[in-house]
Amino acid sequence: MSKPRLILAVESSCDESAVALVREGGEVLAERVASQSDLHAISGGVIPEVAAREHHLWVPRLLDEMLRSDVGRTYAAEIDAVGVTTGPGLIGSLLVGAGVAAAWAWGRGLPIVPVNHLEGHFRAAWLRDSAFAGVRPQLPAIGLVVSGGHTLIVHVGSDGVSERLGGTIDDAAGEAFDKIARLIGLPYPGGAALSALAKTATQRTRRDRLPVARTEREYDLSFSGVKTAAARMALAAAGAPSSEPGRATALQAALRQRPVPPAAAAEIAAAAEEAIVAALVERVESALVAYPGTGLVVGGGVAANGPLRAGLAAVAKRHQRPLSVPPARWCTDNAAMIGAAAHAALSEGRVTLQDPGRGLKVSAAWPFGAEVPS
Ligand code: KG4
Ligand code: ZN
């Protein structure tokens, strides 16, 4: 049998610069991630130009650091191909990663594998290393990808071919978490902090569930209603004169003047988390019922959320399906997942190796499962 392929992977689609060395089968030999979230916390969100400049600094630095490490030096000569995220994401950020990856590959005579970031989140469940070896995912599967920029439910067949079943029609789940976190005074990105605050909520009476609007299509989701309801709760708790949330800037100004008291902030966090998690879990359960014999694979930054993991675990158990969720470090953006997706696309014959000398096309919008944009 031939030696399993080794891929050097690069990720830079949003605000994490990352590189990794990943063996076919999902073994992560080395990886580096540099997050810009502290920088973007100052502006309350990602500024695309700032993100691209930071990638320009960090992608080559991380690559150099990883390849100079003991593991990097041991395996550098075995690298067979370079996998890089070419969409979806911020164009400037994608261009930096694609440019560095293509130049590095060209210099060593190696081919390139363009990778879809969302497929990366889905394939993160196949990763393992000396510290983690979870439930080996099985195909066919229902996939839930929940991140700051995307929320979608897919069906992935045994041949790796996928069909989008549904997703958010407005904000992504992570975006909803981040916006509600901001209302209650938490810095960007607020999902994890909101979840931690929700745990401290003490109200013993039954909490009214915040509304998650029903959508026309069975597997679609809408989070704008939860956001508006959370804004109303925040204004009321802050004693702000208007009960109308109005425009985001006016709302932020009103809440800056009168911040939400801590106990009320915890209640809002708990109510919002409950509503977002319940909506996601319900849609996933419907998909599992509609597609018998599927496993459940979860990925994306929001998959780090404790109540969501618990809710999905309960549903998977009820329907006797294997659940695969990566550890938190592979839920948020990283390059190891890009390596895993590159291996999957190659072994399933969904992508052909590309010549880096011909240039790489990056794409802000590249749907999960669609062919590499040409
Ligand atoms: O996948 P990711 O790193 O970046 C994108 O591709 O968007 O996801 C980041 C998102 C942010 O919105 C962040 O607030 C959210 O994941 N997140 C969480 C948690 N940890 C990260 N949301 C809820 N609970 C968490 N524990
Ligand atoms: Zn992501």
Image (cartoon, grey):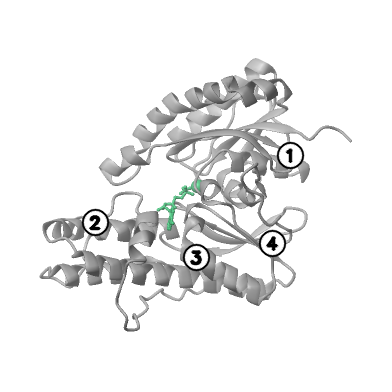
Crowding at mark 4 (Cα within 10 Å: few <14, some 14-19, many 20+): many
First reached walking from the N terminus: tag 1 or tag 2: 1
Residue drawn 77% across the image and 46% down it: 348
Q: Give the CA distance from mark 3 to mark 4.
A: 18 Å
The residue under label 1 is 24
Residue 26 lies, with reference to residue 113, above or below; the image says below
Query: Horizontally, is 152 left or right of 229 in the view?
Result: right
The residue under label 3 is 308
Callout 1, which amino acid? Glu
Can residue 48 be seen here? The reply is: yes
Crowding at mark 1 (Cα within 10 Å: few <14, some 14-19, many 20+): many
The residue under label 4 is 141
Disc 1 vs disc 4: which is toward the camera? Answer: 1
Query: Horizontally, is 6 left or right of 250 in the view?
Result: right
First reached walking from the N terminus: tag 1 or tag 3: 1
Q: Secondary structure at mark 3?
A: helix
- Give the number of the disc on residue 100: none
- Specify the quadrant of the image occupied by residue 116: top right
153 and 17: which one is in front? 17
Q: Secondary structure at mark 1?
A: loop
Point out residue 29 in the picture as x, y percentages from the top left corner. 65, 34
Residue 59 lies, with reference to residue 87, above or below; the image says above
Q: Give the CA distance from mark 4 to mark 2.
A: 38 Å
Crowding at mark 2 (Cα within 10 Å: few <14, some 14-19, many 20+): some
Q: Give the CA distance from mark 1 to mark 2.
A: 44 Å
Point out residue 199 in the picture as x, y percentages from the top left corner. 37, 66
Callout 2, which amino acid? Gly
The residue under label 2 is 185
| Ligand 2 has an atom within 8 Å of the beta carbon of the residue at disc 1 | no
- Specify the quadrant of the image occupied by residue 252: bottom left
First reached walking from the N terminus: tag 3 or tag 4: 4
